[in-house]
Image (cartoon, helix red, strand yellow):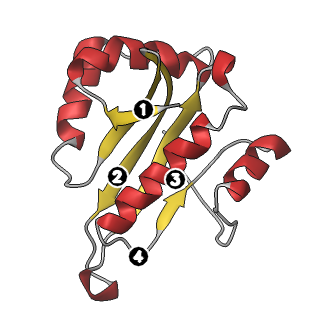
Amino acid sequence: MIEIKDCKTADLPALIELYAFLNPGDLPCSVSCAADSLGQLGRYPGSAIMTGWVDGTLVASCTLIVIPNISRAGTPYALIENVVTHGDYRKRGFGTAMLKDAVGRAWACGCYKVMLLTGTTKQSTLDFYAAAGFAQTKTGFQIRR
């Protein structure tokens, strides 16, 4: 059973370790930088870095950002980012539980849609998102520095 809760400052060292499974080879964020980012995220009501715990071990996480909106009669929308499950805990439904919780939170905030993007072309990952209820209905674009 996974326990899902919002990330706290004390959880950041474990979260930074978990992110090694998200983008292997990336330089890790410092705890102080992570704490600053967590504080900034907290200024957006409904937004959180969600953490999933099994027997006291952080095994999964995703970030939910609820974005204020002026179109759609001012109805907000949400973005899910940084979806990750520890390599030793995959294929147990923890990632799906994180996504379902994030979507439920977005609906509770009155969001009219929830979006996520993935850079992977791995069919298993695409199937994971589809099984969690997400559909490829838009074309995504990005620009990077």
Could one spot residue 122 in this view of the protein? no
Judge the density around disc 1: few (<14), some (14-19), many (≥20) Cα neighbours within 10 Å: some
Q: Residue at x 17, y 34 (%)?
A: 39
- The earlier-in-sequence mark between 1 and 2 is 1
Q: Is residue 105 left or right of residue 22?
A: left
Q: Position of residue 69 (x, y in %)?
A: 28, 73
Of callouts 3 and 2, the N-terminal one: 2
Question: Residue visible at 51% across and 21% down?
Answer: 19
Per the image, label 1 sits on a secondary structure element best described as: strand
For label 3, the residue is 100
Which amino acid, by three-letter code, is at mark 4?
Answer: Tyr
> Depth-wise, is mark 3 or mark 1 nearer the camera?
1
Which residue is tagged 1? 3
* CA distance separating discs 1 and 2: 20 Å
> What residue is at 31 percent from the left and 58 percent from the top?
66
**What residue type is disc 2 on?**
Ile
What residue type is disc 1 on? Glu
